[in-house]
Amino acid sequence: MTKYIFITGGVVSSLGKGISGASIGKLLQLHGFKVNMIKFDPYINVDPGTMNPYQHGEVFVTIDGAEADLDLGTYERFLNIYTSKANTNTAGDVYKTVITRERRGDYDGATVQIIPHITDEIKRRFVALKNDCDISIIEIGGTVGDIEGLPFIEATRQFQLENKKEDIFSIHVTLVPYISGAHELKTKPTQHSVNKLREIGISPDMIICRTEHHLDESLKKKISLFCNVKEENVIEAIDASSIYCIPEAFYNQKVDSLVIEKLNIKPKKKFDRTWFAKIKSLSEFDKTIKVTVVGKYADLKDAYKSIDESLNIAAGELKAKAEIEYLGAEDKDLVKKLKNYDAILVPGGFGSRGVEGKIKAITYARENKIPFLGICLGMQCSVVEVSRNLAKLKDANSTEFSETTKYPVIKILEEQKSVKYRGGTMRLGNYKSEIKKNTLAHNLYKSTEIEERHRHRYEMNPEFIDVLEKSGLFVSAYHKGILPEIVEIKDHPFFIGVQFHPEFASRPMKAHPLFKGFLSAALKKK
Ligand code: GLN
């Protein structure tokens, strides 16, 4: 029998509902339960794939090719699971399904309404993973009180009514702000937010309070009394040095026991505490590596969330601290600033803005033998860079940025030519590559066959492979012997570009070989 944990949020957005949910999921996993997590986002976009990263942060890609909320990355990294299309939902996708059914005539003449048709579809998605896990954690995005989120909260209420009390645990994550003038933490926003939730018919079993300062007993008592939650179920979530320390902070407040007790389940094995110690050991550093990520969204770390995580995880395994700095690809002083770093990463991206800056950063990394990792657009830029500067193909470019270039070294994929709709139509999800032996890629992966996640429309143009190989850049992995997947340069400590996104596959204690190789090359140079 699957049990359900619902997570809602109140007061403000960005409280880390995903991290709170994943931390509880981790504790339950350490008790031996099989845990999965599902995200519901209340916006009308069918998925975040068409959204600007400034709106939504990184677009996470699942192995089956869903373009999803970055919280799915948090779920995968905390729980060491693979998510799929069933783990990500939006209001737009729910409405699309219902409207398609209506057009097909499936509703038999009925007036199609939010209640019951939309809420029924939401409830169907709540149970989508019930055969795959003991506990399904359902995160409702947005903030309680938003008009958009109402159908999801209403569906949660109905689901509670239709299921046994002991099968559902409801958690509300709120903010307890500190007013510095009064030197006081304030509970009123939490009280209001819980009232809003109770108005809709949901009384939370637990309140997780995000706070910058410890909550004392009297404060917890007050929240307990006003919000109708037992005092021990008022949980403090204080800002942590690493998000992976949060499960232990929750364990120390018995969050897992409280959930297990209400859900009336028995742990499947003796609690495994070694995870806490292993996580701690990842932040015992004796050296630092200065890495720069040269991208378009330098002031929004969330736009490169999985890259940030991958670098930290890999550095931790090397007993080093990654000092990651984001440089704007359009910064006029970009090249001057590059001398401050031990490693240069150019991430994925779309559109021409910043591309010339990225290419300059790659020239710098290549000429000065600074370890370089190019991801997706970063790989494509490295091909353009070598074409222009080593193969002397003047003004070589990707047709994404110049349709009339004489040397289209990156061109649109054949299958993309007929694409009319932008959403969900890229080359998405896992594809296999065959790696050539005696290459850097082979040395890192220690395998000749890999599978990695993709999200792109353009590829390296096979017509130019010969001339580029003569100039020093060669292809070390192909998909089905045709599509170039990895490029490298010889006589360089570490220069590699990959058409795919390795950043989605890193997990704590399981650093991705490309990131680990990249940072160890940086350490060797020091
Ligand atoms: N814009 C490039 C393409 O579509 C690269 C995409 C990416 O970096 N994810 O091929």
Image (tube, rainbow, N blue to C red):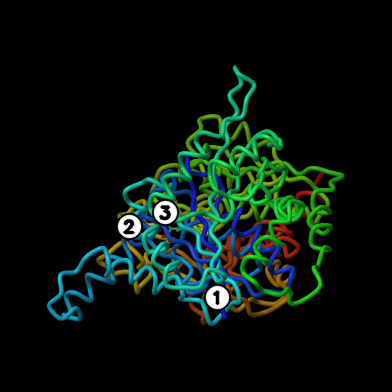
Which residue lies at the image location 68% right of the left edge and 37% below the top edge? Answer: 215
- Write down the residue under mark 2: 45
**277 left or right, relative to 22:** right
Which mark's residue is nearer the viewer, 2 or 1? 2
- Write down the residue under mark 1: 478
Residue 138, horizontal then vertical, whole percent: 51, 63
Q: What amino acid type should be assigned to the residue bearing mark 3?
A: Asn
Of residues 253 and 280, the one nearer the viewer is 253
Q: Quick one: label 3 or label 2, which is nearer the N terminus?
A: 2
Between the residue at mark 3 and the residue at mark 2, the CA separation in whole angstroms equals 32 Å
Identify the image quadrant of the N terminus: bottom right
Between the residue at mark 1 and the residue at mark 3, the CA separation in whole angstroms equals 21 Å
Identify the image quadrant of the C terminus: top right
Q: Quadrant of ligand 1?
A: bottom left
Q: What amino acid type should be assigned to the residue bearing mark 1?
A: Tyr
| Label 1 crowd (10 A; few <14 / some 14-19 / many >=20) | some
**37 left or right, relative to 446:** left
As helix, strand or loop, the secondary structure at mark 2 comes to: loop
Numbered mark located on residue 221 in the image: none
Note whether residue 243 is visible. yes
Between the residue at mark 2 and the residue at mark 1, the CA separation in whole angstroms equals 34 Å
Q: Residue furthest right?
A: 286
As helix, strand or loop, the secondary structure at mark 1 comes to: strand
Which mark's residue is nearer the viewer, 1 or 3? 1
Residue 74, horizontal then vertical, whole percent: 59, 58
**11 left or right, relative to 251:** left
Labels 1 and 3 touching (C-beta < 8 A): no
Q: Quick one: label 1 or label 3, which is nearer the N terminus?
A: 3
